[in-house]
Image (cartoon, rainbow, N blue to C red):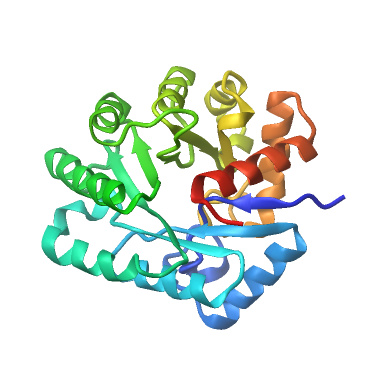
Amino acid sequence: MRHELADSHGHLTMVFEGGDARGRSRPATPAELALLLRRAHDAGVTRILVPGTTREDAPRAVEIAEKHDGVYAAIGLHPHEAKDFDEDEDLRRFEELAKSKKVVAIGEIGLDYHYDHSPRDVQKRVLTAHLRFAKDKGLPVILHNRESEAELLPILEAEYRGSPEALRGVFHSFCASKETGQRAIELGYLVSFSGMITFRAAENVRQAAAGLPLSSMLVETDAPYLAPVPHRGKPNEPAYLPKTAKTLADVLGVSLEEAARATTENFKRLFRVP
């Protein structure tokens, strides 16, 4: 039985070369995008949020969203790109892009203390600028958190605090502790689970999910990354989302129908879409 699902984080702007997840990413062609969306629809994925990560792919995310029903966009610079951020110029560009009705969030933004592709003080400054821009626009944010919650949570508390009833954003591809998830939820942020939850070595992700409420959860692909079991090693795509949702449902001890309904409603509530 097919259940309606919403992919809260799918990079439809890109695909992998070479047909597997070890390839380099490149922009998706219109034909490739059409096939991805057709397979997603056939799998019951009716809504997809496409995040921006660079100056180049943020406009592409908006263009894709404007051309396809049920597809929405976020705009922002990934923390890996923070070192190149020009606040005046980049926010001016985002100001123009945000005029599209299909832009429903700011992101993918955040902190990455694992790879440290940008200096940490720069990452924090750029995150703060994006949060203030999102607050000014009244838009939620899509957060990247990699080993950075000790500094990320206080920034959110100071700059863009909400509550479970007044949502401010989502921690995408959540892989932190249950305690981090609980604090994020208190501050008005949902937690989103990717195909990582299906990985044999990701018991920590399943344990965190088991201790958090379905009422504060989303599901995502992070396509073309993090394909769920049994598709590991392949490029991920929205059509694989039911595998992730089923594992999340099993971890929580609920039916796939219940998990699909709750996460889809949360998607609509956070991003304020029909």
In the rendered image, is residue 237 in sight?
Answer: no
Q: Position of residue 127 (x, y in %)?
A: 23, 44
Instruction: Report the residue at 19% width, 48% height from top.
Output: 129
Instruction: Report the residue at 70% width, 35% height from top.
Output: 247
Q: Position of residue 243 (x, y in %)?
A: 71, 45
Rendered image quadrant of residue 97: bottom left
259 w.r.t. 240: above or below: above
Dividing the image into 4 quarters, which one contains the C terminus? bottom right
Instruction: Report the residue at 72% width, 65% height from top.
Output: 41
Q: Is residue 41 left or right of residue 111?
A: right
Number of disc labels: 0
Rendered image quadrant of residue 146: top left
Which of the pair 262/252 is nearer the observer?
A: 262
Q: Is residue 105 left or right of residue 268?
A: left
Which of the pair 6/23 is nearer the observer?
A: 6
222 w.r.t. 145: above or below: below
Which of the pair 81/7 is nearer the observer?
A: 7
Q: Is residue 157 left or right of residue 162?
A: left
210 w.r.t. 235: above or below: above
In the rendered image, is residue 46 in sight?
Answer: yes
Rendered image quadrant of residue 256: top right
Q: Position of residue 225 (x, y in %)?
A: 51, 53
Q: Position of residue 171 (x, y in %)?
A: 43, 38
